[in-house]
Image: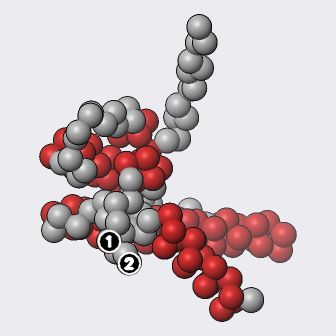
Amino acid sequence: MKKKKKYKKSSLSILSLAGVNSYKKKKNEKYMNANQIKHFTKILETWKEQLNKNKKNIYHVSKKSSNFPDPVDRAVQEEEFNLELLNQDRENKLIKKIENTLKKIQEKEFGYCSSCGVKIGIKRLEARPTAHLCIDCKTLEEIREKQILG
């Protein structure tokens, strides 16, 4: 008799952040039923809340700056400021994606590919709750991007 290996869940996982376990689908359960919607809504809202909590005001970041006489110190400080702005921009874009996904839940369009309409799948949505394309359509999109960008 084989023992099942237990994998430790990463503390950085979106599921861990929301304090939920991976969704266990029941036999003959309808896709995107009330329990599944509740599961994903909790994940998305917790994720959004966490991002908003970590948000820093640009004013506070720039206020922290000093005028270093050494050009190397000044360059390091400017690079850190630029990285902070880049991270904030990424987080703002992610918050907008989460808000759009929550809107899709309200409109009962969540969980289905926006390109072909097939089910995206519970496991894929748990890995990337803001996914709006199925694996096949996402793969085709990435191939097209590579062809365009060269």
Q: Which percent across, then down, holds residue 52?
A: 36, 57
Q: Do the residues labelled 1 and 2 touch (CB within 8 Å)?
A: yes
In which image quadrant can residue 8 be found? top right
- Residue at the image point whose x is 45% and y is 53% from the top: 124
114 up-or-down from 35: above or below: below
- Amino acid type at mark 2: Ser
- Amino acid type at mark 1: Gly
Neighbours of disc 2 within 10 Å: few (<14), some (14-19), many (20+): few
Residue 115: which disc? 2
Along the viewing direction, whichever of 25 and 20 lies nearer the viewer: 25
Q: Which percent across, then down, holds residue 70?
A: 83, 70
Q: Quadrant of the N terminus?
A: top right
In which image quadrant can residue 143 be found? bottom right
Neighbours of disc 1 within 10 Å: few (<14), some (14-19), many (20+): few
Q: How is the image coloured?
A: secondary structure
- Residue at the image point whose x is 24% and y is 45% from the top: 36
Q: Which percent across, then down, holds residue 61?
A: 52, 65
Label 1, secondary structure: give it: loop
Question: Do we see residue 68 in this rendering?
Answer: no
85 up-or-down from 121: above or below: below
Report how far apart the C-alphas of labels 1 and 2 lie in the structure.
6 Å
- Residue at the image point whose x is 55% and y is 65% from the top: 87
Question: Do we see residue 143 in this rendering?
Answer: yes
Residue 77: which disc? none
Label 2, secondary structure: give it: loop
Residue 117: which disc? 1
- Residue at the image point whose x is 71% and y is 70% from the top: 79
